[in-house]
Amino acid sequence: MRVMGIETSCDETAVAVIEAPAGTQAVGRILSNTVYSQLAEHRRFGGVVPEIAARAHLERIDGLVAQALDEAGLGLADLDGIAATGGPGLIGGVMVGVMTAKALAFAHEKPFIAVNHLEGHALSVRLTEPVAFPYLLLLVSGGHCQLLTVRGPGDFTRLGTTIDDAAGECFDKTAKLLGLGFPGGPAVERAAVGGDPRRFALPRPMWRKPGCDFSFSGLKTAVRLAVEKLPADDPQAIADLCASFQRTVGDVFADRCANALALAPSSTLVVAGGVAANVYLRGRLEEIAASHGATLVAPPVRLCTDNGAMIAWAGAERLRLGQVDTLDFRPRPRWPL
Ligand code: KG4
Ligand code: ZN
């Protein structure tokens, strides 16, 4: 089964083609995975500007579809389905992806699958690792921070979520306060190298509280106060603060996942979403999983941030179950799992 996936919910225009096996336990194969990052267009605004994003998606999408097919060595006629992120996300961008997928599906008489972006992240691990359902999932991105039990496509139980900000947002804010640039996650991770993770004592919201909810607004405020007191032109102080911040997020993730593993025991803990690209945090999660007799499984770093392959894979998982959408599907700015 060959499926195209289109991702346009934020600031990456991405189109991929994957091959999915017939059986539900085998991994897939990425035939092409193209992405146009709009970073340069948003950088001077310090964040994603929805109107600029929508226009950039529109300008790039046709070229990326052609490139993805070309790199896969396939034509549209060779595909078994066309999937696109149907939400949640910036609605202008989601509309561009959905309309493109619908038009291609209609013209070439192929099934159309509207994929929930969060489900794309949630199932992405199965594209490259033979992970069986059910598994426990920590989903950490720029807009979300949740713990879930994943039983299959469309079959999730939410154990906890953030009561204010997402973890990725907290990374982005920290980077902005320190003038490290955008997006913040990779910048903070780079700046933390060689830093002293014990120099700054930052608050760990929700730490040692029952349940699996998260909170990051207090940590964000504490980072702002620490930045205000930072000596000028002191790269070591910046490295120390980034390392301390990362350790604090690691403590919170470990504590929340420990509760989740106790409440909903699972032999597999999966981490996905942009923040899952952080190597230090992956290490912390590996430790906490092992201490509960579980194994951490994560997608390769390049498949953690937004990409078309995860949308194609989630589309394939749905297609296998006969779960396709009609062409009157309406893009959804909000779409909880
Ligand atoms: O999943 P994603 O690409 O987009 C959303 O669906 O939101 O996640 C983007 C988020 C951003 O907040 C970004 O700063 C964060 O993931 N991120 C990271 C790293 N790479 C990306 N956070 C921490 N460490 C990283 N290496
Ligand atoms: Zn995402």
Image: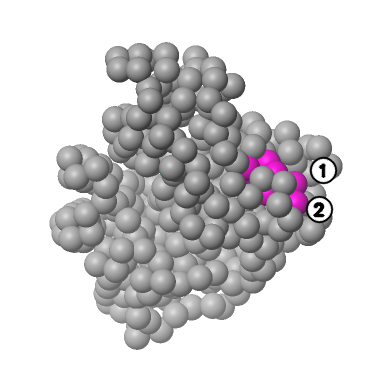
Mark 2 belongs to which amino acid?
Ala
Residue at the spot of label 2? 262
Q: Where is residue 107 in the image (x, y as percent from the top left)?
A: 27, 76
Secondary-structure class at tag 1: loop
Decide if residue 249 is on the left or right side of residue 91: right
Q: Which of 337 and 98 is in front in this view?
A: 337
Please give the name of the residue rendered at 84% of the width and 42% of the height, measured from the top-left corner: 293
Q: Is residue 108 visible?
A: no
Q: Can residue 162 be seen in this view?
A: yes
Mark 1 belongs to which amino acid?
His
**With respect to residue 4, does 247 lie above or below?**
above
Magenta residues: mostly which secondary structure?
helix
Secondary-structure class at tag 2: helix
Residue 148 falls in image quadrant: bottom right
Earlier-in-chain disc, 1 versus 2: 2
Please give the name of the residue rendered at 67% of the width and 56% of the height, measured from the top-left corner: 212
Q: Find the magenta span and give its range.
A: 252-260
Report if the CB atoms under discs 1 and 2 are less than 8 Å apart.
yes
Q: Distance between the residues labelled 1 and 2?
A: 8 Å
Disc 2 crowd, CA 10 A, few/some/many (<14, 14-19, 20+): few
Q: Which mark is nearer the camera, 1 or 2?
A: 2
**With respect to residue 116, does 37 lie above or below?**
above
> Residue 206 in magenta?
no
Please give the name of the residue rendered at 34% of the width and 39% of the height, measured from the top-left corner: 183
Disc 1 crowd, CA 10 A, few/some/many (<14, 14-19, 20+): some
Q: Nearer the viewer, residue 59 or 322?
A: 59
Decide if residue 53 is on the left or right side of residue 331: left
Residue at the spot of label 1? 292
Q: Is mark 2 within 8 Å of ligand 1?
A: no
Q: Position of residue 34 (x, y in %)?
A: 33, 46
Q: Where is residue 116 in the image (x, y as percent from the top left)?
A: 47, 67
Query: The C terminus lies in which quarter of the figure?
Result: bottom right
